[in-house]
Image (spheres, rainbow, N blue to C red):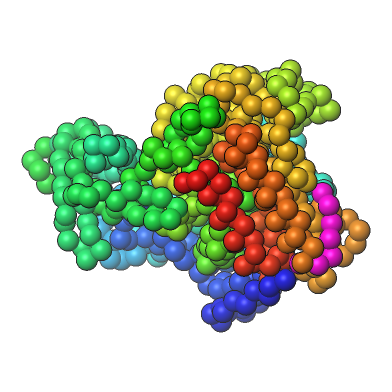
Amino acid sequence: MTIVLLVMCSATAGAYQLAGDHIRTLWAENIDVNQPWNEYPRPMMQRQQWLNLNGMWSYAITDKQTAKPAAWQGEILVPFCVESALSGVGKLLDESHALWYRTSFAVPKKWDKRQRVMLNFGAVDWSAEVWVNGIRVGSHTGGYTAFSFDVTDALVRKGDNELVVRVLDATDVGYQPCGKQRSKARGIWYTPVSGIWQTVWLEPVPQTRIKRVYCHPDIKAGTVAVETLSDQLVGTTEVRLIDNKGKVMARAEASLLPVLTLPQPVKLWTPDDPNLYDIEVLLKDAKGKVVDRVRSYFAMREFGMARDSEGFMRFTLNGEPIFQFGLLDQGWWPDGLYTAPSPEALYYDIDKTRQWGFNLIRKHVKVEPELWYAHCDRVGIIVWQDMPSGDYECGQPWDDWGHSYYRGSVVCKRSQESIENYYKEWGEIIDQFGVYGCIASWVPFNEAWGQFNTWSVVNWTKQRDSSRLVNPASGGNLYCCGDILDVHNYPEPKFFFADPDRVLVMGEYGGIGYPVQDHTWVKSDQNWGYIKFSSAQDVTDTYIKYAQMLIDLAQKRGYSGAIYTQTTDCETEVNGIMTYDRRVVKMQEDRIATINRQVIKALGN
């Protein structure tokens, strides 16, 4: 086994203490409570001025009918959920409770008073209502996407402003998407996450502003069309291609959709050479005056599928066949739950995945902060993005679905409210994260968890974003739709059947368990894996045996992708390549990196 050594900066502590007595990462032991997560949170649309509101806030937990807390019960470290150790609270919230937050802030004097001030939330699980200086500024439902309010008219420019947030979160009681969260954690289900779990920040913006930048690359033409969403019609949009020294290499301007022609030769994005192009986007009024500008970037790449000479459908990247091989990544932390202790911690898992020779991560029934996807863009990791599952109580027969054959008989009977919320939240996820080049596939369902109207959901997803493939249902309850046929099997990879019109993948396999003493969530026989060993040698030998089987399946049975379970241990699951606290790598790293690269080259590419 490999012991992971990390170098940390010292942190301030004061009266703050981590809650609970579970294992912790080294990053958590060195947390900066004054301003955690102090990295600009929106890398695809960057402005120069912003104010991070993360830090110690007041909190209270009341009955959900309570209009206002009678008193504040203590302090909570934002942006960590109330159940987490890093929040300093470590209390569970249920469907009968409301979670309240309070903080204060002063608007920086250097901000232009002619601009509007936006209050931004990276993510709040699940329902949030917000007041500034006693004025209700808005509300939002959905635990995985960012939202903003224009709070300008509620602010005072001199002195402190009061910010109050009220959160309701029923977790798995009801229809809301909640992924692996459960009110009662057990087995493959983990501790609930409630409240603010991503960065909260203020930002001054022009009266007329850019709201989204979406780049559409055309690798054959060597061009990129830059779609800009603004809050009202203006004159034109100018796009400038910027080199690493800030020099303008090319530009384009149009009233609706400027198309930028790239200098030759065009540098394509691949996992082996993840080239990115930096741009500046300028919004101009009818007289040509610049009214807003943001920095962004894009990747010149094209994900697709094509039939090979043997008749198998294969994944393609930039027109070339590629075997996509990676890890099931839950994105959970023993101290922060949904939230990594810091951006450095967040990037660490991605960097280790790349170091181990993988080219893919399946982000499993969870969504990450935008910084996570930007780092995948930078280092060359392909992403399959799941929709966080939910509505587990919709009447589906859990024991009546199969992954070993086409069945498609299990249908979740969702209410109309549940259906509408699914489309709302899935659409927001696609819109927000579809700007990142690393995402190759959308995965609307996993193993029949809340699965409904599969054909309709797949078609809707394709219409929302036609540039990616759609994996209809990873691991079971399979229907003849979408682009990918995805089966699961534990522990070894296995062939069941194929579809000549779809890409065949092993969406989950492995799960080799190995509990490392002093590095497990619980110290009892609750720790589990699909199979269990007691040494890094045995785990690595078994992993390599399965990888060799996978190479054979790729070459002879048409598999074009596979996902090993999993990156880290998660609570009572001990089947990660790393321990949950990220302090121990449980396999022999050089050996797995070597075999992983052989798997990726199984198609001869």
Give percent across and percent down for residue 3. 68, 75
The one nearer the camera, 173 or 326, is 326
Residue at far right of view:
525
At 69% across and 27% down in the image, what residue appears? Answer: 497
For the residue pair 148 and 368, the one nearer the viewer reads as 368
The reply, left or right, for residue 136 in relation to residue 257 is right
Q: Residue furthest bottom?
A: 10
Is there any visible trace of residue 555 in the rendered image? yes
Res 512 quadrant in image: bottom right
Q: State the residue at coordinates (70%, 56%).
A: 544
Q: Quadrant of the N terminus?
A: bottom right
* In this picture, residue 376 sits left or right of residue 185: left
Please say whether residue 291 is visible from this viewpoint: no
Tell whether 306 sits left or right of 23: left
Q: Is residue 318 above or below residue 20?
A: above
Q: Quadrant of residue 58?
A: bottom right
Q: How many marks?
A: 0
291 sits to left or right of 599: left
* Image location of residue 280, percent across then percent down: 24, 52
Taking the view exactly as shown, the residue that stands out farthest to the left is 287
Residue 532: in magenta span: yes
Name the residue nearer the viewer: 518 or 171: 518
Camera-nearest residue between 591 and 18: 591
Part of the protein shown in magenta: 530-536
Q: Identify the residue shown where x is 64% and y is 26%.
A: 498
Q: Is residue 288 above or below residue 573?
A: above
Residue 487 in percent (x, y) is at 68, 34
At 41% from the left and 50% from the top, the residue drawn is 270
Provide residue 424's location: percent of width, then percent of height.
Answer: 53, 30
